[in-house]
Image: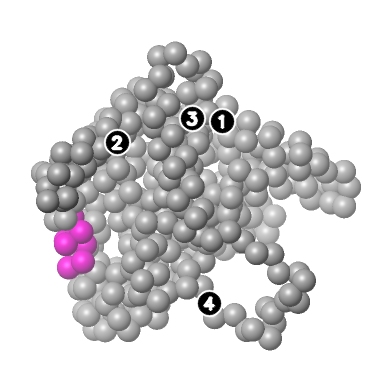
Amino acid sequence: MEGELKNFIKVWITTIFCLSYCHYIVSRLIPKGLLRLISLLPVFYLLITTPLSLHSFHLCGPTTFFLVWLGIFKLLLFSFDLGPLSPPPPSLCHFISIACLPIKIKQNPNPKITQKPRNLIVQKPNKSVVVAVKALLLGLIVHIYEYRSHLHPYVILALYCCHMYLALESILALAATPARALGFELEPQSDEPYLSTSLQDFWGRRWNLMVTNILRPTVYVPTRRVAGRLVGARGARLAAVMATFAVSGLMHEVIYYYLTRVRPTWEVTWFFVLHGACVVVEVEVKKAVSGGWMLHPAVSRPLTLLFLAVTGNWLFFPQLVRNGVDTKAIGEYAIVMESVKANLPHLQS
């Protein structure tokens, strides 16, 4: 554990140096375009290779997601003076936070436009309380894993789905803490995905919105622009949706490789391709019945979650389970607890 933490610190020190180079040299001295892209190639290399020194699920997984996916995609946009890093924030801390953390800065709203009557304002639960409740639920699920041998496979599948959701929510909330401490007002990172009424609602408006926000300018918009010249507006929109899901699948394959260190089986890519095709069909059906009959949310919500669970069990989880990533992730909770118990007397003294 100590060696893993040292490697984790080295990875993030390297990242800070790379992003300092981007902020102080690239953004100020190198013009946008191909030349800036070439100047960032050493940074891409370091962001891709340094997380390979990590082997812990809870350190390697998020770090790969932040640096190899979000970080590189944001810097690709930055190469052409696009995306959240353009124009570059004046502060290095701001630049680093935006570049490698799963956050999106909220634009200052016009209070005259956004102000609502008091009787229409819905009081939402305190975010800290919500995060604490989700952390407790995650701890309960980890405790239930001790009885896995007595549980039905479908129950274990449900636990895995809940675990993934709660773990991602906790990681995103933790990653956003430094940005909030710097005074950023952030866009929501997700929006209660268990309330999704369709796949389009789940992937586009509720689940891990940080990925949606980075895939839209890097994949969806360019694909739609290029395809529009070849197949027309309607075909371009559908091609852009499929391309976005395919790239998401490929990036998940990359994260899976960092976690398993085995050759990809492409199951998770097919998971996203399947969901992309289903979203395309869903969009076309909605257009065909616009203003007509639609499923009630009481029906569409459980159907959406059921489809996600079934296809996840078929294509999303098998590669992780086959390589023991689930067992390793669960075991790391026990290691952390043992470490805390071992160091507790020293802390009290």
How many neighbours does mark 4 have within 10 angstroms: few (below 14), some (14-19), or many (20 or more)? Answer: few
Q: Is residue 66 positioned above or below 151 on the image?
A: below
Q: Which residue is mark 3?
A: 159
Whether the residues at callouts 2 and 3 have beta carbons within 8 Å, the answer is: no
Decide which of tag 4 and tag 3 comes sooner along the chain. 4
Q: Secondary structure at mark 4?
A: loop
Q: Is the N terminus in the top left, top right, bottom left or bottom right quadrant?
A: top left
Magenta span covers which residues?
Answer: 11-17
Report, in whole angstroms, how far the alpha carbon at label 1 lies from the one at label 3: 11 Å
Q: Is residue 68 positioned above or below 276 on the image?
A: below
Q: Which residue is mark 2?
A: 333
Residue type at tag 3: Leu
Which numbered marker is on residue 309? 1
> Which residue is at a point 17% across and 68% down the rendered structure image?
17
Decide which of tag 2 and tag 4 comes sooner along the chain. 4
> Which residue is at a point 40% across and 81% down the rendered structure image?
87
Q: Which residue appears farthest toward the front when viewing the image?
A: 349
Report, in whole angstroms, how far the alpha carbon at label 1 lies from the one at label 2: 24 Å
Q: Is residue 131 magenta?
A: no
Decide which of tag 2 and tag 3 comes sooner along the chain. 3
Q: Is residue 15 magenta?
A: yes
Q: Is residue 180 visible?
A: yes
> Can you give x and y, in whole percent of width and height, for residue 185 in the image?
47, 73
How many neighbours does mark 1 have within 10 angstroms: few (below 14), some (14-19), or many (20 or more)? Answer: some
Nearest the viewer among 284 and 347 is: 347
Whether the residues at callouts 4 and 3 have beta carbons within 8 Å, the answer is: no
Residue type at tag 2: Tyr
Q: Which residue is mark 4?
A: 107
